[in-house]
């Protein structure tokens, strides 16, 4: 059974700092991996989707990498802003059956 | 991007009553919809997968007779929590997928259910 772990569970940084969020998964046979943002009491916003054949994806200040063989993905946020404060979730899709497994998330606080 | 809506956004009900949550894809036809549940400070857990016109596939440990899912059209799926109890209080999120949009799932804003 696929287990998805996110470290750290919570992170607090001053504004402007670059930071890395980590996601690991136990079964490297994934179809794709997706990073989401969740604001308190809200639904999910998709940030980046990496297919299993890709190594990284970039969108603005966000860069996500994928190392399937080691079962790891990182989300890099450059020049963090208070508006980046949210919970960041990674999810892996195991195969074409469309099943996604989520990590517990990293709660990020960016202090002004 | 594609838009998925959920209604209601919040609902409070008495124990023993049934609650229906709607999930709609507003600008595309969703061949597959998913229902997730999230308890406080925990991750999302997939409850069931539904394909239009067929019975939903439930995850292990999810009672299909308690959580009724109907995917009657390509733009609407409903989740009915029957005889709700306080332990059913949670955040319910749906998502929708259309193959032509790639593998991305589009998520609704969620419905917060509180059972008293």
Image: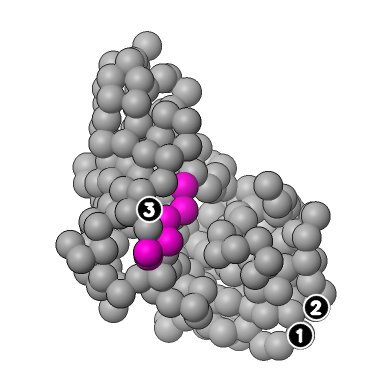
According to the picture, the residue beneath numbered tag 2 turns out to be B72
Mark 1 or 2, nearer chain start: 1
Q: Residue B11, how many percent across, how many down? A: 67, 52
According to the picture, the residue beneath numbered tag 1 turns out to be B53
Does dot 1 land on a helix, a strand or a loop?
loop
Colour scheme shown: one colour
Q: Is A79 colored magenta in this rendering?
A: no
Tell me, yes or no, whether dots 2 and 3 are on the same chain. no
Q: Residue A78, how many percent across, how many down? A: 34, 26
Instruction: Confirm whether residue A25 shows in the render.
Output: no
* Pair 2/3: label in front: 3
According to the picture, the residue beneath numbered tag 3 turns out to be A90
Tell me, yes or no, whether dots 3 and 1 are on the same chain. no
Is the residue marked by circle 3 packed among few (<14), some (14-19), or many (20+) residues within 10 Å? Answer: many
Cα gap from disc 3 to disc 1, whole angstroms = 30 Å
- Residue at position x 26%, y 63% in the image: A68
- Residue at position x 35%, y 20% in the image: A79
Q: How many marks?
A: 3
Q: Chain of mark 1?
A: B
Front-most of B18 and A46?
Answer: A46
């Amino acid at each position: 059974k696929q287990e998805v772990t996110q470290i750290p569970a919570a992170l607090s940084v001053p504004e402007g700092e670059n930071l890395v969020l980590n996601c690991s998964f136990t079964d490297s046979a994934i179809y794709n991996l997706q990073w989401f943002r969740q604001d308190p009491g809200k639904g999910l916003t998709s940030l980046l989707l990496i297919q299993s054949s890709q190594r990284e994806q970039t969108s603005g200040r966000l860069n996500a990498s994928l190392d399937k063989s080691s079962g790891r993905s990182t989300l890099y946020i450059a020049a963090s802003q208070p508006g980046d404060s949210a919970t960041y979730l990674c999810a892996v899709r195991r195969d074409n059956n469309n099943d996604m497994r989520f990590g517990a998330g990293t709660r990020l606080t960016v202090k002004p | 991007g594609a838009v998925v809506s959920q209604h209601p956004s919040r609902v409070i009900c008495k124990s023993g009553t049934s609650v229906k949550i709607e999930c709609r894809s507003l600008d595309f036809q969703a061949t597959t919809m998913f229902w997730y549940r999230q308890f406080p400070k925990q991750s999302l857990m997939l409850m069931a997968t539904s394909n239009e016109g067929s019975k939903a596939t439930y995850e292990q440990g999810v009672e299909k007779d308690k959580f009724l899912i109907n995917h009657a059209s390509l733009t609407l799926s409903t989740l009915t929590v029957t005889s709700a109890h306080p332990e059913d209080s949670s955040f319910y999120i749906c998502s929708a997928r259309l193959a032509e949009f790639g593998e991305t799932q589009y998520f609704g804003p969620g419905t917060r259910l509180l059972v008293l």
